[in-house]
Image (tube, helix red, strand yellow):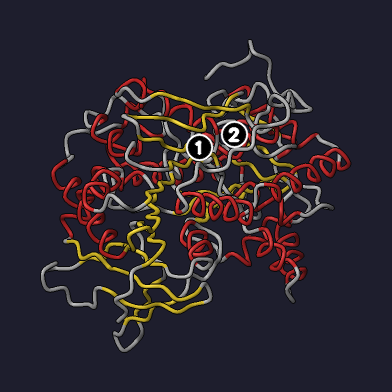
Amino acid sequence: MSTDKSDLVVVYHRQPYEEVVLDDGTVELRENSSPNGIVPTIKGVMGKMESAAWVAWKQAEDPQRPQFEQIIEIDDSYGTYSVNRLPLTEHEVSSFYHLTSKEAFWPILHGFKERYNYDPVDWETFRSVNRKFAEAAADAASDDAVVWIHDYNLWLVPGFLREIKPSVKIAFFHHTPFPASGMFNVLPWREEIIRSLLECDSIGFHIPRYAQSFVSVARSITSARTIADQPTDPDMSPRGDALSERWTPTLMEHHGHRIHIETNPVGVNDAYVEELTQRDGFAQRVQEIRDWVGDATMVLSVSRTDYTKGNIEQLETFERLLQRRPELRGRVRLMLVSVGANRAMAAYDEIQQRIEEITGRINGTHGSFEWQPVSLISTAIPMPDLVAYYRAADICSITPLADGLNLVAPEFCIAQGDEGSGALILSEFAGCAVLLEGQIPVNPFSYANMDRALDAALAMSEEGRRERMRDLVRSSKRWNITAWSDATMKLFRALRRGEKPEITPSAAMASDRTSEIPIVSASDTSVG
């Protein structure tokens, strides 16, 4: 076991591999099957560092005597790195992750104040778990290392880490939306959270809106101030979009400490998606899917089962389509992939039940023995097969009520390719909506808007769809995983040298690009 300290320490709750139990009961550690997703994305940056470590949790009956080796060495296609598997009890995992993070933080981050549940939160356990992560990170880090912390369930790690090992550079990346002060300040622990985050040297967000929201929260709670901003990159500032921001904050100061505010959207691994489309058998698989759909128009939607994802709104829109336009029965089909979350959590179980009920109602009312209008898949589809569905689909409809970024939309575009003729319906409240150009924007809180977006996609000419898809592919590649990792490495180098991270002001103010096809007027926004 190596005792060397690392120049980069990743702190994330999940382990950087899959644990597979073999027939003989032994556990095999396997590299993630797909290079898409948070874990492979982070590992892609780790592989560019000379020495790296990862801190994650692993459940143990007795953390003082865990029945596993706590620090192990991993050698995979991303490089060689150590993993500190922090032993946590079942109670600690449930308290800090399933209760505090998912029942208190998650609804507030996504704007669902009515789902916020303060009662089960054991704040002392959350604080204790975060301190354990900080201690493990400090132990693994060299004196001038960058410690890279990921996501909201580790909000308190920066504060503890600064106390334990003040010499390290602390970078935090937020993968979810970040709400403005009117929503965030519902949390009774808001000051402790924000003061911890202000100990970072850099805080990263996907899009300018989330960065602006963090700044507003920090200024509402502390004496922190913004000391630099810049016009938003023209490629992430469509005028009038729900998540648009014309200015992007870049630097804050708190008690003499400067915090770089990074806006850097995590993109899709476009090279991998394109490679899948070139594999032997891909074209045949696409044709098999088209044969299964027949002459019908195929509408595809892919997401997790969560009240933030808009799956219920998606189904209800499709139901209204069949009610409004009975001539389309048998001529349009919805394939909804809604991958089940933790069924032990009541909120997700409730959503899954409603999805199944609405699907059954639509198929029972509008289907027949020979044809079902909705196909519901509740298990994950392997990536090679999913890319074939992307290529085969006529319409991809992604309609979350709130989503930090969403990579399904750009994956669909890359799979379609420059010659693709698929149409993309995309919620204005998905972070990637400000990055992708050519989608049909939709407000999922409006019945009329959802109906018009689906009608527009069904009515659009093939040439119109192809023209939009070329723009969608271009913008998806502009914000790909390579762009994200390159910007991240530039940030790390600047932090370790003690330099102010490079900020390149835009040559002009944010662009005025708008959707080519307005879907609904300002007066037509009824929720129904």
Q: Where residue 287 appears, x then y in whole percent?
A: 77, 65
Q: Are there few (<14), some (14-19), or many (20+) residues within 10 Å of tag 1?
A: many
- Left or right, 84 with reference to 7: left
Q: Earlier in the sequence, mark 1 or mark 2?
A: 1
- Give the residue at x 26% y 50%: 161
Is residue 311 visible in the rendered image? The answer is: no
Give coordinates of residue 267: x percent, y percent. 60, 50
Would you call the spot at circle 2 few (<14 residues within 10 Å), some (14-19), or many (20 or more)?
many
* Residue wearing tag 2: 427
SS assignment at label 1: loop
* Quarter of the figure with residue 85: bottom left
Q: Residue 9 bears which disc, if any?
A: none
At mark 2, the secondary structure is: strand
Q: Are marks 1 and 2 in contact (CB under 8 Å)?
A: yes
The mark lying in front, picked from 1 and 2, is 2
Numbered tag placed on residue 310 in the rendering:
1
Tag 2: amino acid: Ser
Q: Is residue 213 above or below residue 153?
A: above
Residue nearer the viewer, 359 or 21: 21
Of the pair 25 and 389, the residue shown nearer to us: 25
Residue at 60% x, 40% y is: 432
373, 219: nearer the viewer: 219
- Amino acid at dot 1: Gly
Residue that extends furthest to the top in the rendered view of this protein: 523
Question: Residue, x 52% and y 19% (percent of image)?
Answer: 527
In percent of width and height, residue 407 lies at 58, 49
